Amino acid sequence: MGSDLKRLPAHFYRLDSGREPVREWLKDLEPGDRRAIGEDIKDVEFSWPIGMPLVRPLRRELWEVRTNLPRGRIARVLSAWSRDAWSCFTDSSRKLRRLRNAKSNWR
């Protein structure tokens, strides 16, 4: 499948230093986990709009992509949509809890 068929191309958030934390996190995972998360990201790219259970809205432009992994684990990648692409910018469930707690302050 070519990138021209993607309905919503994914981009990994890049820090000013050039690091891409989510890409680094993915590379550190076991191959099976990395493949499962990559498949889900690909599903979003090629099948958008897509909803639960794979993608869940958290706020207006903030979404969570959830991947079920072996041994009852769940991987979460937070992402934000802008115009014709979406950026994957975090992978931590601790950060997700913080975002959920803070969302009442968002406008």
Image (cartoon, helix red, strand yellow):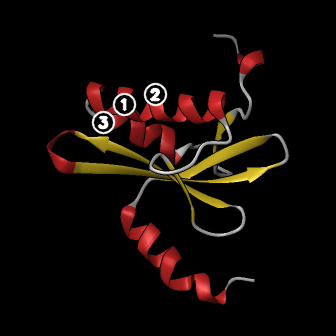
Q: Which residue is mark 1?
A: 36
- Residue displayed at 65% across by 70% down: 59
Task: Provide residue 11's location: percent of width, then percent of height.
Answer: 66, 38
Tell me the quadrant of the picture where the N terminus can be found. Answer: top right
Amino acid type at image mark 2: Glu
Q: Are marks 2 and 1 in contact (CB under 8 Å)?
A: yes
The one nearer the camera, 16 or 56, is 56
Amino acid type at image mark 1: Ala
* Residue closest to the far left: 71
Q: Is residue 74 left or right of residue 37?
A: left
Q: Secondary structure at mark 1?
A: helix
Residue 27 placement: quadrant: top left
Estimate the spatial distance between the alpha carbons at disc 3 and disc 1, rounded to whole Å. Answer: 11 Å
Q: Are marks 3 and 2 in contact (CB under 8 Å)?
A: no
Q: Secondary structure at mark 3?
A: loop
From this viewpoint, is residue 13 visible? no
Q: Secondary structure at mark 2?
A: helix
Estimate the spatial distance between the alpha carbons at disc 2 and disc 1, rounded to whole Å. Answer: 5 Å
Q: Which residue is mark 2?
A: 39
